[in-house]
Amino acid sequence: MMFGQLGKACFLVMALFIVACSTSPKTIEPSLPFWVSEPPQDDRYLYGVGSAEVLPDIASSFDLAIKHANLDIANQLSVTVQSMSAQDIQVQVFDSQQEKVMKTLSQLVRVETNPIQLNSSETDQRFSHTNYVYVLQKLDRKNIIEQLKDKISTVDHRLLQIDKKAQYEQPLIDQWPLLLPALSLLTERRHLNETLSLYSKGETVEQPQYVFKVQAKTAQLIRELRISVDEEGLNNTLSQTVSSSLSKKGLTPTIVHYSTSHLSLFLTPQYEYKTQENRHYVFVSLNARLERNDQTALASWTTSARGISSNKEQAEMSANQEVAENLANSIFVWMTKSTH
C-alpha cells in the first residue's frame, strides 16, 4: 500500500514536470521609450519621431524611419509658418495700395520660403522593437536661421539689381516691367523675415537702403498706373466687372479713358444661353489683349466660365464674375513676373 502511494506521488511529479517542459515561457516585450510618444521640447532643437517596419535589412528600416522623422520636422516647420498670422510680429509697413497688391501676390504666387533643408538633422535616439524601429531626429534651429538669412540675402541681391537698372530720372510708368516684379521680391522678403522672427526669438534682417528705395518707387508706380478696360468700345457689364476684379487686387482700372491710362485692355466676349428644367445656363468665352497706348501688343489671354441660376440675369452675372476673376488673376501674375 505504501508502494502504491509512492507510485502515485512519482506519477504526479512526472506529470507536473512534463507540463512544465511543454509550456514555453512567455516573451516579455520591452516597453517603448518615452520619446516615441512625447518628443523632447527644447529651445534650441526641433525634434521629430519616425517609425518603420522591421525589414530583413535592419539598416534600411532605420533609413526609412529617419525619413519619416524628418518629415515630422518638416510638418512642424510648415505649421509654424502658417501660424505667423496669429503672432505679434513687427513688420515693415507698406503703402495701403501696395499692401493690397502684396496680399494678392501672397495668395496667387507661391512664396519660396520652403523647403528648409533637413539634411543637417541629426539622429538623437534609435530603438528597435519587435515589429518596428523608431528614430528620434533633431534639427538645430541655428541651421534654420542661417538658411533663412541666406534666402533673404539672395532676395536682397535681386532687389539691388533692380535698383541699379532703374532709371529714376525717367517716368516710373515707363519702367513698370522692371519695377512691378520687385513686389514679388518684397513680398517674399517680408515672409522670410517673419519666419526668421519666429525661429530667432524676434531677430530679423534689417532692410538695406536700396530696398527702401525700390519699395517707395513701386508704391508710387502702383498709385500712378492706369489700365483702361474696353469691351468692344463700350462700357458694358463685363468691363465693369473686370475693372472691379483688377481694383480688388490693387491695380487701378479706368473705363475707356485712354487719355488718362497707360495700358489698354480690350475685351471680346461671346455668350451662349441654354435653359433646362427651369434652370438658366450662361456660357461666356472671353478673349482679352493688353496693349500699350501706342498700340504695341503686350499679351493676350483666353478664358471661359459658366453661370447657373433660376434667373437668367443672375446666371449671366455669375458667369461674368468668374471669367473676370480668372482674367484679373492672369493679368496680375503676368504683370508681376520678372520677364515680359
Image (cartoon, rainbow, N blue to C red):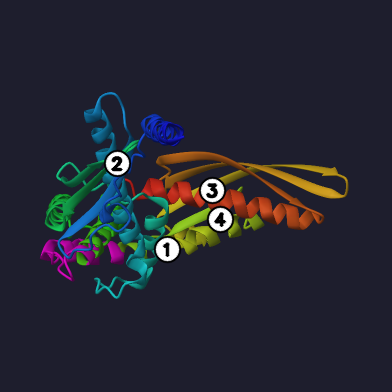
- Residue on which disc 4 sits: 242
Q: As shown in the figure, which amino acid type bears the numbered disc 1?
A: Gly
Q: Is residue 255 at all visible to an observer of this figure?
A: no
Mark 1 to mark 3 CA distance (whole Å): 16 Å
Q: Is residue 316 left or right of residue 154?
A: right
Determine whether label 3 and label 2 are within 8 Å by CB: no
Q: Name the residue beneath numbered marker 2.
A: 339
What is the secondary structure assignment of the residue under circle 3?
helix
Q: Amino acid at mark 4?
A: Val
**Sequence-earlier tag: 4 or 3:** 4
Q: Quadrant of the C terminus?
A: top left
| Residue bearing the label numbered 3 | 326
Q: Is residue 111 magenta?
A: no
- Give the CA separation, mark 4 to mark 1: 13 Å
Q: Using the image, determine if residue 54 lies above or below residue 274.
A: above
| Dominant secondary structure, magenta | helix
Give the x, y percent position of residue 59: 21, 29
Q: In this picture, which residue range is highlighted in magenta?
A: 198-220
Between 127 and 165, the residue placed more toward the observer is 127
- Disc 2 vs disc 4: Cβ atoms closer than 8 Å? no
Task: Tell which circle, 1 or 3, labels the residue nearer the N-terminal end.
Answer: 1
- x, y percent for residue 253: 48, 60
Residue at screen point 17% across, 49% down: 158
Q: Count neighbours of disc 3 (C-alpha within 10 A) and say few if under 14, some if 14 to 19, many if 20 or more.
A: some
Mark 3 → mark 2, Cα distance in angstroms: 21 Å
Label 2 vs 4, first from the N-terminus: 4
**How busy is the neighbourhood of tag 1: few (under 14 within 10 Å), some, or many (20 plus)?**
many
- 328 over 90 or under it: above or below: above
Residue pointed to by mark 1: 250
Numbered mark located on residue 300 in the image: none
Pick the front one: 87 or 243: 87
- Asked which secondary structure carries label 4, the reply is helix
